[in-house]
Amino acid sequence: MSGLPLSHAKIVKEKIREGDKLFSALYLEVENAGLVLLSEGEDRLGTLAVAIPQAQKMVGPPLSSILLGDRNVVIARLFAERLAEKMNKIALASVFIKSMGERESGPVLVKLFEKTVKKEERKKTST
């Protein structure tokens, strides 16, 4: 297979502490999709949502659906849709929160998500 370009997945890990709780993010990007795992504590798979970006010239948010779980469905779909829109790719988002509700964890996870995605965007522009 000489002469064929090799595909390399991009991986970003981030953590933030909010009060006495640690939150972690793991972002994996391949050529046609992105996956973000947002967790309270260490990396874990939680409620999993998938979203596809809207076609150009179409009005409205990306289309999304829950694939797994039922605990954090609203926020998992929100992150999948946001990632699909930002990257213009198929997006998967997992949210695992064990000790708080979406209302309390939402602002922290948004901050973590933005920090993680911006880190990958900076990598792209510097190469």
Image (cartoon, grey):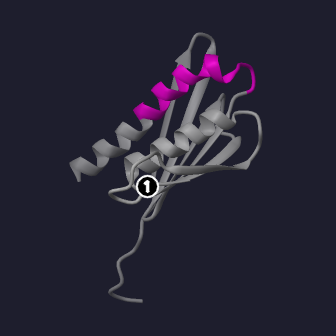
Name the residue nearer the viewer: 14 or 54. Answer: 54
**Residue 12 visible to an observer of this rendering:** no
Is 106 contained in the magenta span? yes
Residue under circle 1? 54
Q: Amino acid at mark 1?
A: Gln
Residue at figure coordinates x 68%, y 37% from the top left: 73
**Residue 126 visible to an observer of this rendering:** yes
What is the residue that sits farthest to the front in this orientation? 59
Determine the main secondary structure of the stretch shown in magenta: helix
Name the residue nearer the viewer: 58 or 63. Answer: 58
Residue 107, image x, y percentages? 52, 20
Q: Quadrant of the N terminus?
A: bottom left
Residue at figure coordinates x 23%, y 48% from the top left: 125
What is the residue that sits farthest to the top in this orientation? 19
Residue at figure coordinates x 61%, y 33% from the top left: 75
Name the residue nearer the viewer: 14 or 55. Answer: 55
Mark 1, Cα crowd under 10 Å, few <14 / some 14-19 / many 20+, is: some
Residue 20, image x, y percentages? 63, 11
Residue 126, image x, y percentages? 22, 48
Is 124 contained in the magenta span? no
Quadrant of residue 26 within the rendered picture: top right
Residue at figure coordinates x 63%, y 19% from the top left: 103
Find the magenta span and give its range: 98-115
Q: Secondary structure at mark 1?
A: loop
Residue 39, image x, y percentages? 63, 33
Q: Is residue 64 above or below residue 30?
A: above
Side (left or right) of 66 relative to 81 = right
Quadrant of residue 88 within the rendered picture: bottom left
Q: Is residue 90 above or below residue 75?
A: below
Q: Is residue 58 above or below residue 19?
A: below
